[in-house]
Image: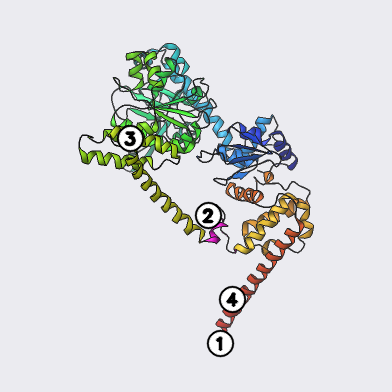
Amino acid sequence: MAFPEAFLEELVEKNPIDEVVGQYVHLTRKGNRHWGLCPFHNEKTASFSVVPDLGLYYCFGCHKGGGVINFVMEIEGLEYPDAVRNLAKRAGMQLPEEDQRQASTLRRKERLWELCRDAARYYHRMLKIPEGQPGLKYLLGRGLTQKTITSFGLGFAPDGWDNLKKAMLTKGYTVEELQDAGLVRTRKRQKQNPDGSLREEVSTYDWFRNRVMFPIIDVRGNVIGFGGRVMDGSEPKYLNSPESLIFNKRKNLFALDKAKKTKMGMLVLTEGYMDTISMHQYGFDCAVASLGTALTSEQAGILAKYTRQMVLCYDGDQAGQNAAKRAIGVLEPTGISVRVLRMEGAKDPDEFLKKFGPERFQQLLGASEDQAIYQLETIRRKHDLTVDDEKVAFLKEAAEFISTMSNQVEREVYCGRAAEIAGVKRDTLMVLVEQNRKAKVRTAKKKEERKILRPADQVQPADSSIKYENVRSAMAEEGIISQLLLEPGLLTQTEGLKEEDFSSPLLGRVYGWIRNRWQQGLSTGVSAMAGDFQPRELSHITRISQKYETVVNEKALGDYITVVRKEASKRGNKDLMAALERNLGKKGYGG
């Protein structure tokens, strides 16, 4: 929907971009910019910038950018109207003449959050009645206290096909909402009519039945889904809510809503719900768990917002070791320092804490290995170092691993450790490491050289869907746009320049948009573009605003206009000649 211009200007003014972005990204001020790690891609060095004076954000790494409305659209996955509503709510502003019955993504999300919260309360209440005693007995049998059960909102889904559905329908929710939240499933069956014909019968039933329930809560405290552990030994043992408008298991972690408040200076990643809950009960309030899947890059990016140190606490079996190795690779690009905890005498943290107590676990945390030592030790365990061939294989694999380290000091330190393990001189292994390193550098250099030999590629937009057909004209068009973003009053010098003169359809649209807005006396900044341009387009426009002159340059503007007009004239002549040739061909001339 379209919002009044005065309302949007007030909205942007009352939602300073550095404050809004600062809710998601730790920002450090340097000059007139704020810098932080980009929330849209994994990085070790801050390349994400916010310019409060211009109301813009831009990442020099992944090239995403725009204004405050666009940022909320990107970070929260909202459509334009819902991002506006989100910011209005934040600023305590009343939406102008809005039809409250109009459906919106944000309203649907809020309704599903309410539904999941009521479902969690229902499951928790079940523990207090006879039908829920199997669930309570299981939880108490796992050593959980009543306080922990209440703190995590644990519950029980009784056996039966529609217990939850009936309870939620009574509270005013619809079957469609239950389906959208992933709380019921649809079943289609063929039924026979009295006359022998068949009809399709559609019914719905509870997704979770006869399971202990673990509410999944996002960092803002919204119940977004559930995990359920079966009670009768059937498969699957654990079942999560299906993907929905509010639940994406790749972008959430269990118990992060609690662990983000820890004072322990680290987060501990476990494999399951019970491990995490047990750690919290024993005083380790820094534990989180991925949701029944291998750690994802999205989850790693979220963790990087809350900690600079991560301890992996996976099961000690081969599957756990493989999962730890994968997690290291996912976490490293975020800049998080990764350590790995090795457990002896117990298969997982829950069992270890019950068997040895919190003091021993604290010692175990203190003795956790940095990820490089862990990986070297993992490589060592694959080889029998008493056999020469196996020792050589270990050294080759270790050298390959160490050669991936960008820091020379790290390479030397871990070379010494690997050489010590194998009983060889460090310098011997260092030669092998540097050979691998040089090979990697050569490969990277050749790749860069190939890229440099294609100069036209260097000026193409970062988004491949926005392609420049005429690079010379497009560069001048970018210059025009950058100048008009700085000072729209320069439009008085572009008289006669039309959108059709631009070789890039996007840049032509931007030019027309700025011109029309300026003529109406409206804001022409990037922050006002969110309702008229797609996020990828806004990112490119923001990139242009960061790429060219930071001061008004009328001479440069004149040069840009000259180039655009010349290139447009060339295109026009080519099009005219092509049309004449087609026309002559049809009439049979020139044969």
- In the rendered image, the quadrant that contains the N terminus is top right
Q: On the image, numbered disc 2 is attached to which residue?
A: 464
Identified at 74% across, 55% down, the residue is: 515
Taking the image as shown, residue 330 lies to the left or right of residue 85, namely left
- Percent x, y of residue 382: 26, 35
Is 105 or 465 nearer to us in this picture? 465
Element under disc 1: loop
Q: Can residue 391 be seen in this view?
A: yes
Amino acid type of the residue tagged 1 in the rendering: Gly
Identified at 73% across, 40% down, the residue is: 9
CA separation in Å, label 2 and label 3: 44 Å
Question: Residue 84, located in which quarter of the rendered image?
Answer: top right
Amino acid type of the residue tagged 3 in the rendering: Ala
- Percent x, y of residue 392: 25, 41
Q: On the image, numbered disc 4 is attached to which residue?
A: 578
Amino acid type of the residue tagged 4 in the rendering: Ala
